[in-house]
Every structure is written in C-alpha cells, then in structure tokens.
Image: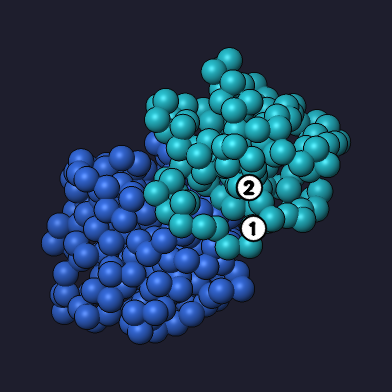
Chain colours: A cyan, B blue
Amino acid sequence: MEYPVMIVDDDPSVCSAVVRFMEYAKIPVVAVESGKACLEELKKGFKGLILMDVIMPEMDGWDTIKEMVNRGFPEGVIVCMLTGKEVPDAKMDELKEYVMDYIRKPFDYAKLVKIVREYLSYLD
Amino acid sequence: MKPKKIVVIGSSAGGPRILKQIFMDLPRLNGSILIVQHMPKFVNESFANNLNTFSDLTVKVAEDTEQLKPGYVYLAPSEVHMTLKNNERIFLTEGEKVNFVCPAVDVMFKSLRHEPGLNIIGIILTGMGRDGAEGISYLKKIGGTTIAQDKESSIIYGMPKEAQDTGCVDYVLNPQEIHDVLIDLLGVIET
C-alpha cells in the first residue's frame, strides 16, 4: 500500500508547492490549512506522513501534536515538522518522541521527496 | 565473552537521516553498538530493518536480557528504558520519562560501568533538549571517549550543544567523521 502525505500549513503557497512536488513524485497527498483540519483528517483514519508547519493561527504545530498525543498518538502516523523557524522553541522538548524530523523551509524538490520517501518506507 | 568495545549513541529529531549517513557502508565492526533514538513505538522494527540494510553490521531491536555480541547494533524499543548490566547484558524496564522521554539517553549512558580493558564510546547526535548531556559527563568520568555531532551537520543543534557545554566532549564531528572514527576505534571483524 502506498501511504499518503498530509501537508498542514496555513500558507496556501506552501501547500500547493508540496502538493505539486508529491504529485510529480507520484506520492498521494492531502493538504489542510490548520491543526484543527489535520485532527479531522486523523479522525477519519489518515495513516501516513504528516508534514507539519509550526507557526499557525489558533492551534500551532506543537499544540496539534499535543492534541494527537492526548487522543492517543495514532499508530501508522509519522510526523515531521516543515517550518521556516530556524531553531525550534521549547514546546518541542516534551513532544520530541513524536517528531521524527525537522525540515526547514525553503525546501527543494529532490531533498523533500528523498526525506518523504525515507519516512514513508518506515510505514511499509 | 564480554565485548571489549561498546558504543552508545543518543539521537532524536532528524536522527534517522544522520544514523543512515553514519552507518552507510560500515564494515562489520568489532564492538557492540547501542542506540537510543526517540521515536514512536510502531516505527521500531521498520527503522531497525531499514538501518540494517546499509552496513555489514546486524541491526536489531533490543530484547530484554539479551547478551551483547560484537558486530551487532541494538536499537532501544520505545516506551521502556534500556540499560546495560555488567556492561554485557541488556535490560528493558518500564519507568517514568526522563528528560521528557522513555527510553532516555541519560539512563542508558549512566548504566555503563568502568571496567579495565573495556573501551566505551558515547556519541550524541542531533535533537532537541538536553537528553544525553548528563550521560556524556558520566561516560567521561568513567574513562569513556565522548563525541558530539557538529553544529553544521546537526538538524537540531540542541542535544549536541548541551553535551558540548558540559566540557566533557572529546571530539566534535560530522557524520562522515563519526563513520571513520568508528572504524578506527572499533576495528573490523575479520571473516
């Protein structure tokens, strides 16, 4: 089974870039604009790799992961941060067991697809 | 027979990519390697299987009461602390999180003991927070060789910096240099 990627980012240009890259690479992808929408996708049974922005209005990336943990961190879901924030803030410290990687923007096609494929392979 | 060389590695966010670079094409080294990589439990087996494909070492998820063997890499399973007894046998125990994590790097590092003739090498790789910093100080105190990943190659320069700030790190290296040092310090098992 080919597992999908979920990009969670309030910036539509980031979402569309990731969607385009994944489509080129023939990796199924879904884009959502908020932590809340991400939780909704998980509720519907999403399994795969989440690329999570850090700074988002209302519920930031860390709060979203915290809520995932509170609900029982889902099996079959890998989270990598995808952010412009050079240095992660202290909120990450208590969530580091749930975050496999920290990818910085801007990202290029080859690098992002390579990382995505690597983490998707852990789900096989 | 007890191993003569033990390498303990602590790693967190971004670690899988870095570990892959370090392990890529390593020969069968004459020592035992233990890794604490913070990650969700369901990833344990697939991560070990994946890492197993990059070198001549045998990478496996550690089992309780397992005896260390040279040429083997033992990955700490999630949600238990991994310790060594008498520098030769792995124990997996449930316990409180330390530094917000279980397994914790500090818990594993601090379970090693000074032993004449035993070469201990502690390595701290990329990651957030300060897990491993106390462990590195401890290893230095019992005569171990200590290494931290350099800033340039660290995906998150948190754990390696905290380790360096203890003043107990012997070498600051990038993944390729760590790869080379492992070969130099452990040597290769001749077949």
Quarter placement of the C terminus of chain B: bottom left
Q: Which mark is residue A85?
A: 1
Residue type at numbered disc 1: Lys
Percent position (x, y) of residue B161? 45, 73
How far is disc 1 from disc 2 in space, using C-alphas? 8 Å
Q: Which mark is residue B131?
A: none
- In this view, B77 is above or below B174: above
Pick whichever, B62 or A80, lies toward us: A80
Residue found at x 53% / y 36%? A64
Quarter of the view holding residue B115: bottom left
Residue type at numbered disc 2: Ile
Q: Chain of mark 1?
A: A
Q: Earlier in the sequence, mark 1 or mark 2?
A: 2
Quarter of the view holding residue B167: bottom left
Left or right: residue A109 compared with residue B173 = right
Left or right: residue A60 compared with residue B41 = right
**Residue B150 visible in the snapshot:** yes
Q: Secondary structure at mark 2?
A: loop
- In this view, A105 is above or below B114: above
Residue found at x 50% / y 39%? A63
Percent position (x, y) of residue B158? 47, 66
Percent position (x, y) of residue A36? 59, 28
Pick whichever, A18 or B174, lies toward us: A18
Q: Which mark is residue A55?
A: 2
Residue found at x 40% / y 36%? B41
